[in-house]
Image (cartoon, grey):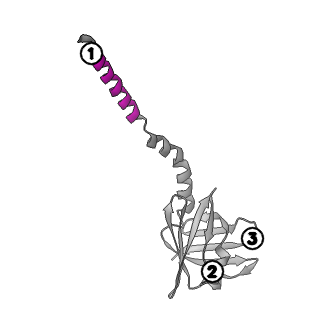
Amino acid sequence: MKTSISKLMLLTGILFSGAMIFNSCSKSDSINNAITPAVAGVVKATSGILNRDLIVTMAIDGGTNITADFNSIVFTFTSTSAATGYADARNDLLNVRGIWSMQAGNITMSFPTNILSQLAFMNREWIITENGNNVELRSASGDGDLIQLTGK
């Protein structure tokens, strides 16, 4: 009987110790700690773009100023995860929903162009060179193309 009680107490102690170790080093903690720097970088890179209305204050395509092509369009970028989301382009009549994604500090946009054909200019990878009230994007291809967005 003493042996059974001793074994039961030992088993209870082992189970209790295991539970304490398991709770103090949970899988979610190690996952959250591992991705926090990457998520923080995306949040910082997109902070000037997300969840506000933006207008194009300058657009340069191949050395030509095409800002007027975007005069009536308001852009809003929202996130669906840490590094992706929706990009809405709207004017008084239309709303076109595209997507954006972030990788290595660069943002890539993809809009359907059958309604607002000028959105084709934005469909590429951009380097965020200024990120605050004014957002500046330069084409990642190095061709000199530029977009400046400002909060509305």
| Point 32% across, 18% down: residue | 10
Q: If the image is split into quadrants, where does the N terminus sit?
A: top left
| Point 68% across, 72% down: residue | 146
Nearer the viewer's eye, disc 1 or disc 2?
1
Q: Is residue 132 magenta?
A: no
Q: Which of marks 2 and 3 is nearer the N terminus?
A: 2
Q: Earlier in the sequence, mark 1 or mark 2?
A: 1
Quick one: which residue is furthest to the left in this view? Answer: 1
Name the residue beneath numbered marker 2.
Answer: 113
**Relative depth, front residue between 151 and 101:** 101
Disc 2 secondary structure class: loop
Name the residue beneath numbered marker 1.
Answer: 4
Disc 1 packing (10 Å; few <14; some 14–19; many ≥20): few
Name the residue beneath numbered marker 3.
Answer: 144
Callouts 1 and 3 close, C-beta under 8 Å: no
**Relative depth, front residue between 55 and 93:** 93
Q: Distance between the residues labelled 2 and 3?
A: 22 Å
Dominant secondary structure of the residues highlighted in magenta in the image: helix
Residues shaded magenta: 6-23
Can you give x and y, in whole percent of width and height, for residue 100 in the image? 58, 67
Disc 1 secondary structure class: helix
Amino acid type, residue under disc 2 in the picture: Thr
Q: Which of marks 1 and 3 is nearer the N terminus?
A: 1
Nearer the viewer's eye, disc 1 or disc 3?
1
Q: How far apart are marks 1 and 2 (CA)?
A: 76 Å
Side of 102 relative to 76 (left or right): right
Callouts 2 and 3 close, C-beta under 8 Å: no
Nearer the viewer's eye, disc 2 or disc 3?
2
| Point 52% across, 58% down: residue | 82
Amino acid type, residue under disc 1 in the picture: Ser
Amino acid type, residue under disc 3 in the picture: Gly
Q: Distance between the residues labelled 1 and 3?
A: 80 Å
